[in-house]
Each structure stands twice: as structure tokens, then as C-alpha cells.
Amino acid sequence: MGRTNGRTPTRPAMVAAASGLALLASGCGYLSGEGGSSGGGTDAADVDCSPYEQWEDIGGTVDIYSSIRDEEAERMDRSWADFAACTGITIEHEGSGEFEAQLPIRLDGGNAPDLALIPQPGLLQRVVEDGHALPVSDGVRENVEAGWGEDWQGYASVDGELYGSPYGANMKSMVWYSPTYFSDNGYEVPTTWDEMVELSDTIAADGTKPWCVGFESGDATGWPGTDWIENALLRTSGTDVYHDWISHDVAFDSPEVEEAFDLVDGIVRNEDYVNGTFGGTDSIAVTSFQEAGLPLLDGGCAMYLMGSFYGAQFEEDVEIAEDGDVYGFVLPPLEEGGEVPVMGGGEFAVPFADRPEVVAVHEYLSTAMYADSRASEGAWVSAHQDLDPANLADPTDQFAAEVLNNPDTVFHFDGSDAMPSSIGTDVFWGGMVDWVTGSSTGEVLEGIESAW
């Protein structure tokens, strides 16, 4: 995850599940443009420093590198300002639109940040195997083991050793739509995949392209297509095959993966269904994911598959609500009453230095205290089990945290992000561009498989 591009004012994003419940996750967005910030601007005399006594008078400077920029970076900067003031630690944050490509270059060149917020377990594994990342401190390990479930701990571990602490979280199994448009035209939210296809046929017959799709994202172009495939594979083959596919125990050109591509093909490469106001299927590769969903507001298309963070792309006067301008439903299962998989992502704070001030900042970022502070700034959710819902800025954010922390929720990490980065965020992203611009499914699958 972590492909971020210039964002408009942030708004919480809400998802309505097929059961009628709402699912929301806000957090990491995929935005572009560079950005930097520094903590420490708050005067300690104006802050209650008692919560930070264990780190008092440490001082020093800690630089953090991430893909987070603009409004989201400003919120993050405010979230650690009191900590910085009370500890005397200056936190310098740099956000980059080329984070995934630049982090390995910086590491290989001896220009490592103190901490990086890495949105892909596959990239995390790479920087560990290349000998750059350090295991977390004992304090961070204790915080992670107490605050997150085994699934989240596993995403930040390599060969049983913990190398990072979970940061934000988001959900990517949602379809954005306009409740007003649906109501005006007598459309209902589908509860199965077949109902969604039938609805698409109806909307197309009524003269509107039912889907908007955009794969363009700068150096990360193609990643929105991987979300389609990952969600489809979870629905056609289930959890075990999904995880075996990520670990390459199921080949990329297996019948199971081909079935998922075929399911998506019926929507994404269907000229009757796409691509909103942007053109036909040939427009998908050059339509930015940020712009792709905006025609929902004026009836230019009816549905858009995109993560919960997409709420940030709408202007402040756009109402995100069940009866508002835009809303969302969870991408439905194949069968009525079937399990509705939840797929998403998040970032992990990974250390590359072990100076006292770096350890202190990392320890703080791994606490429920920090999660509460960041959540209070809005448009962000953590899977931390002790996150206080009262600190979330919006009731829908509160529900998202409840879902993420529900022990019955099986959270599936974004497959392309969990794979080795040379596959998941390289040839898989590129393969989706080839596929949507005309290459056959077989050619694309064989090409990705050969890269393993």
C-alpha cells in the first residue's frame, strides 16, 4: 500500500456492508506530491507532560520517511507534537510519492532514515533480507504483542523476528456509490456478485456506464487493478488459496487465479460497463485513481471499487452518509449469506537506527496513547486493540475500529503488498496495466509467474 497522491481535504469514509451494517476504515491514502514536516513546535510549558515521563529529556532528532503527505502528513505532525515538546525530540518527517522506489535506493546508498512507515510487508521483508532494518526494541515488542493480534504481528515479522510495529489500517473491499443516484433511479445495493452484475446490466441499459475504473498512479500505476483481483480471488477460492498464492504455494498462472481474473474481466474489461465519463476500457490505464470516482457525484458512473481512504478525494461539502452524496457497500460475496472477506492494508513503523531518541519515538508510535492521539486528528483508524473509540473524530471511524479489532474479523492483507516487492509491487502492477490494455489473461499470468 502507500501509493499516495495529492489529496483534497480529508473526510472520513464509510462502508455499508451487504448486511446493512457499516464498515469504515480511514487511514493511509494513496496520494502524490512531496511533503515534509517536523515535530517539536509545541511549547512544553503548555502541555501536560506526565504521560511522556519515561522519555523525558532525551532530546535529539529523529527522521521518519513515508509515503504520507499533504493533509494527512499535517495531521500526523500534530499527533506527535506534545510528545516532541515534552521529550525534546525533534521529529522530521519526509513524505514521498516515490517512496517504494526510493527507500531501497536510499538504504543501499547509506542514506537510511531513522524510521520508515512501510505500507507493504513484501517491502519490509526485502529491507530486512538486504540487511538494512533492525529488529524492534524490547519496549516496542512488548507494545506490539499487547496491542495487536497475531495476524498484524505476522505481517511485521521475518523468520519469527519482529521488525516493525503496525501503524494505520484501511479497508479495500468496498464499492463507492451515490445513494441519491441509486434512490432517484430505483436501484438497490446488491448483496451478491450476480446481483451486482444484474444491476450493472440495468444501469447500462438505462444509458449510464455503471463503473468507473482508474489504474493510473504515477510510478505505482496498476495497483488499483490488483485490488480487483485480490478481492475476486478471496471470493472465488477463499482464504487458504489466497494466502498460498501470496506465498507462491499456488502458482500465479494456476486455474484459481485465472478464475479470479475471469470474474473481474466481466466488469473491468466490459465495454458496456466502463469507464464512466473517461472513455472505454482503453482509458483505464491513464485515468488516475484519484479522479476516477468523482463522476459518482453527477451520475457519470454508478459504482467505483476503491479503498476507504478514497473519502479524502471529495470536497468538504460532499456528504458521506447512507443517505448522502456518496457512500459505500462491501464488495458482495458470490452467494447470498456467504462470508464477506475484508481485504485491506496498513503501514508498519520500521527502525533503521537504535539511538535512544529513535527507540523512544518508535516506542511512542507503538502505544495506544499515540493511536488515540492520531485518531483524534481525524481520518485515520488503527487496528490497535486498545484504541479508545471516544478519540475517533466520527462515529463511522468508531465503527471501523470496532470491526478491525473484532476478534471474529479475519483481515486479509493486500496480496500485492504482502508478496515480495519484486513481484507484488513490480511485475503484478505492470501486469495489470498490460491486461487492461489488451494482453490476454494467459499471457499476463504466465509473465508474472515466470518472474517468481
Image (cartoon, grey):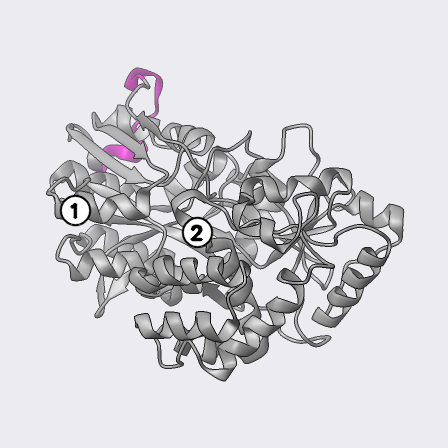
Mark sitting on residue 16: none
Amino acid type at mark 2: Asp
Q: Which residues are magenta?
A: 43-54
| Circles 1, 2 touching at the beta carbon (< 8 Å) | no
Mark sitting on residue 386: 2
- Across and down, in percent, residue 434 comes to 47, 60
Vertical position of residue 117 compared to residue 192: above or below: above
Q: Is residue 214 left or right of residue 141?
A: right
Give the main secondary structure, helix, strand or loop, of the magenta stretch. helix
Asked if the magenta segment contains residue 92, the reply would be: no
Residue displayed at 70% across by 40% down: 295
Q: Secondary structure at mark 1?
A: helix
Measure how far apart labels 1 and 2 are at the Cα level.
34 Å
Q: Is residue 92 left or right of residue 166?
A: left
Front-most of residues 413 and 6: 6
Quarter of the image for residue 193 reads: bottom right
Q: Secondary structure at mark 2?
A: loop
Quarter of the image for residue 130 reads: bottom left
- Across and down, in percent, residue 411 comes to 48, 64
Vertical position of residue 161 compared to residue 39: above or below: below
Q: For label 2, count other residues whose C-alpha is less than 10 Å away and answer few (under 14), some (14-19) or many (20+).
A: some
Q: Is residue 39 left or right of residue 114?
A: right
Amino acid type at mark 1: Leu
Mark sitting on residue 107: 1
Residue displayed at 45% across by 82% down: 254
- Across and down, in percent, residue 361 comes to 24, 39
Q: Quadrant of the C terminus?
A: bottom left
Front-most of residues 391 and 440: 440
Vertical position of residue 355 compared to residue 304: above or below: above
Q: Is residue 310 visible?
A: yes
